[in-house]
Image (cartoon, rainbow, N blue to C red):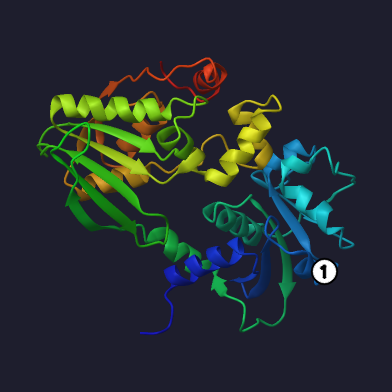
């Protein structure tokens, strides 16, 4: 069958937004063009009509001192098509001082926010800043990827994972280890499981859920404790001669490496890690730990001894069919450079130390 499935169409739409193309989103007998504010070019911006709307998250709206009347997002009329740089500054806090917002903004309070909400979610999944331009159209364009709200629903429900390949991989922590590659059918990134030894599936396995951290795991960044936690967890599993380390591609608490670097830039201005995420338009936590429970169940596990300081991981595991019988604290990697970061995790994110 040559016709793309719903999952394939949504994945194509995310990629189009990432490279600056608009997509068409059909919902309730209406067709809407969706542009990512981050990636829209000056040339495409010049084609916008005067009835174009812009939407941002409630967190970003708070930064701009405007009210988000749809609670989680805010919709506003663009009115006259503003200067391209002014529009780009709606999304990117790096330009908040260079291009101060000059209102008044005209909020949209009537009608459904579903289209705008779905557009923002697609941007998040594409690891873009969560802000969109929307424009209602009468006729679809065959050159523009068109998806429906039903396509998005089907993609969301199609969360089955497949173990693509597994292979022996001797590592420093243990020569008896295997690397498993998992791929979701809904188009999200691949995720990995490192299996140390041959854990008994009938008893709680020693487990660490680790989100990818390029700066900490690879570069040895002193701004976080991620690399130290990764190595400590693997060492514990090596000493016990069994364990499962899940390595999830959810960099920067789920916002991606580019946005994480934007957050670091804001931290250099004095904002803490949570405040920086909010200024970008993200929540404190954008990760989905259900992926971890899906992988564990696929591998035949139903209970774990979890190495973590994050109570949200425990809650998510217990809510999705994996019983956490014990929490094992992990207190390593403290530096002068990450003192404030660790304090914020404890005070604002509820981490246990």
- Residue pointed to by mark 1: 46
Q: Decide: is 23 above or below 142.
A: above
322 or 300, which is in the foreground?
A: 300
Quarter of the image that includes the N terminus? bottom left
Q: Position of residue 2 (x, y in %)?
A: 40, 85
Q: Position of residue 352 (x, y in %)?
A: 41, 18
73 or 85, which is in the foreground?
A: 85
Q: Position of residue 10 (x, y in %)?
A: 50, 67
Say which residue appears at 59% left-offset and 39% top-offset. Answer: 261
- Specify the quadrant of the image occupied by residue 323: top left
Q: Is residue 277 visible?
A: no
Q: Residues within 10 Å of mark 1 (few under 14, many from 20)?
A: few
Say which residue appears at 45% left-offset and 22% top-offset. Answer: 351
Say which residue appears at 57% left-offset and 75% top-offset. Answer: 146
Q: Is residue 79 left or right of residue 196?
A: right
Q: Is residue 163 left or right of residue 12?
A: left
341 or 327, which is in the foreground?
A: 341
Q: Is residue 12 left or right of residue 187?
A: right
């Amino acid at each position: 069958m040559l016709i793309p499935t719903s999952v394939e169409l949504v994945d194509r739409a995310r990629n189009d937004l990432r490279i600056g193309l608009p997509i068409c989103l059909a919902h309730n007998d209406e067709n809407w063009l969706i542009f990512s504010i981050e990636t829209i070019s000056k040339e495409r911006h010049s084609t916008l009509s005067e009835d174009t709307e812009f939407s941002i998250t409630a967190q970003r709206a708070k930064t701009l001192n405007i009210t988000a009347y749809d609670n989680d997002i805010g919709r506003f009329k663009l009115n006259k098509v503003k200067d391209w740089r002014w529009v780009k500054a709606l999304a990117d806090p790096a330009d908040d001082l260079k291009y101060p917002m000059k209102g008044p903004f005209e909020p949209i309070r009537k009608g459904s926010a579903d289209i705008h909400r779905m557009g923002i979610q697609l941007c998040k999944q594409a690891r873009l800043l969560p802000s969109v331009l929307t424009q209602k159209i009468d006729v679809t364009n065959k050159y523009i990827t068109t998806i429906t709200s039903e396509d998005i629903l089907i993609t969301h429900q199609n969360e089955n994972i497949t173990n693509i390949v597994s292979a022996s991989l001797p590592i420093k922590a243990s020569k008896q280890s295997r690397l498993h590659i998992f791929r979701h059918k809904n188009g999200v990134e691949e995720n990995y499981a490192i299996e140390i030894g041959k854990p008994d599936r009938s008893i709680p396995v020693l487990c660490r859920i680790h989100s990818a951290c390029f700066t900490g795991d690879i570069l040895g960044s002193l701004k976080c404790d991620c690399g130290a936690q990764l190595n400590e967890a693997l060492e514990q599993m090596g000493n016990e001669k069994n364990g499962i380390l899940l390595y999830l591609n959810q960099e920067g608490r789920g916002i991606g490496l580019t946005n994480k670097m934007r957050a670091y830039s804001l931290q250099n201005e004095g904002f803490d890690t949570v405040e920086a995420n909010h200024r970008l338009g993200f929540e404190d936590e954008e990760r989905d730990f259900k992926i971890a429970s899906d992988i564990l169940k696929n591998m035949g596990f139903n209970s774990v001894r979890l190495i973590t300081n994050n109570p949200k991981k425990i809650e998510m595991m217990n809510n999705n069919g994996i019983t956490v019988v014990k929490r094992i604290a992990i207190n390593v990697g403290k530096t002068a450079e990450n003192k404030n970061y660790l304090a914020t995790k404890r005070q604002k994110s509820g981490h246990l130390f």
